[in-house]
Amino acid sequence: MVSAAKKQKKTAESINARIALVMKSGKAVLGYKQTLQTLRNGKSKLVIISSNCPPLRKSEIEYYAMLSKTGVHHYNGTNTDLGTGCGKLFRVSVLSVIDPGDSDIIKAE
């Protein structure tokens, strides 16, 4: 039981480190509208959705991602946690990775 919680925390830390590396060395867009735009244009490589993103919005993003054959990762934390993981001081419910840079975030997911 303890090891499962420890493992979950470690994976959360590793995904946060990967997101931070993408923000530093790669290219990513934050937000719902810009994510839909990158999905429609086929530029997105990976979409990360926070846990408290509204269900209708989440399903719409998943649908667009399925059409554009893009991977979707459901982030375990809230939109506040995802914003902090991006190094921003605001909430981020959706993040679209365009260029991973030095990070292996796309291979890891």
Image: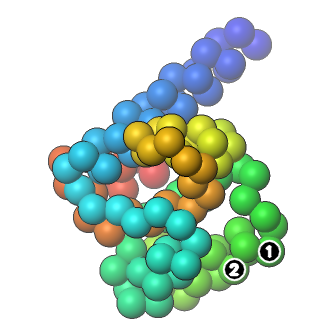
User: How far apart in space, not on screen, are marks 1 and 2 (Cα)?
Assistant: 6 Å
Point 53% across, 66% down: residue: 31
Residue 20 image offset from top left, x and y in percent: 35, 41
Q: Is residue 74 visible?
A: no
Disc 2 residue type?
Answer: Glu
Residue 17 image offset from top left, x and y in percent: 37, 34
Point 54% across, 32% down: residue: 12
**Contact (Cβ within 8 Å) of mark 1 with mark 2:** yes
**Few, some or many residues within 10 Å of mark 2 (<14, 14–19, 20+):** few
Residue 68 image offset from top left, x and y in percent: 47, 85
Judging by the rendered image, the residue that carries numbered circle 2 is: 60
Task: From this view, report whether residue 107 is shown above or below residue 67.
Answer: above
Position of 98 with respect to 65 (left or right) is left
Disc 1 residue type?
Answer: Leu
Position of 12 with respect to 43 (left or right) is right
Q: Nearer the viewer, residue 42 or 93?
A: 93
Q: Secondary structure at mark 2?
A: helix
Q: Secondary structure at mark 1?
A: helix
Q: Nearer the viewer, residue 106 or 54?
A: 54
Q: Nearer the viewer, residue 66 or 47?
A: 47
- Label at residue 56: 1
Q: In the image as oriented, which residue stretches furthest toward the front?
A: 89
Which quadrant of the figure contains the N terminus?
top right
Task: From this view, report whether residue 40 is shown above or below residue 91.
Answer: below
Point 81% across, 67% down: residue: 55
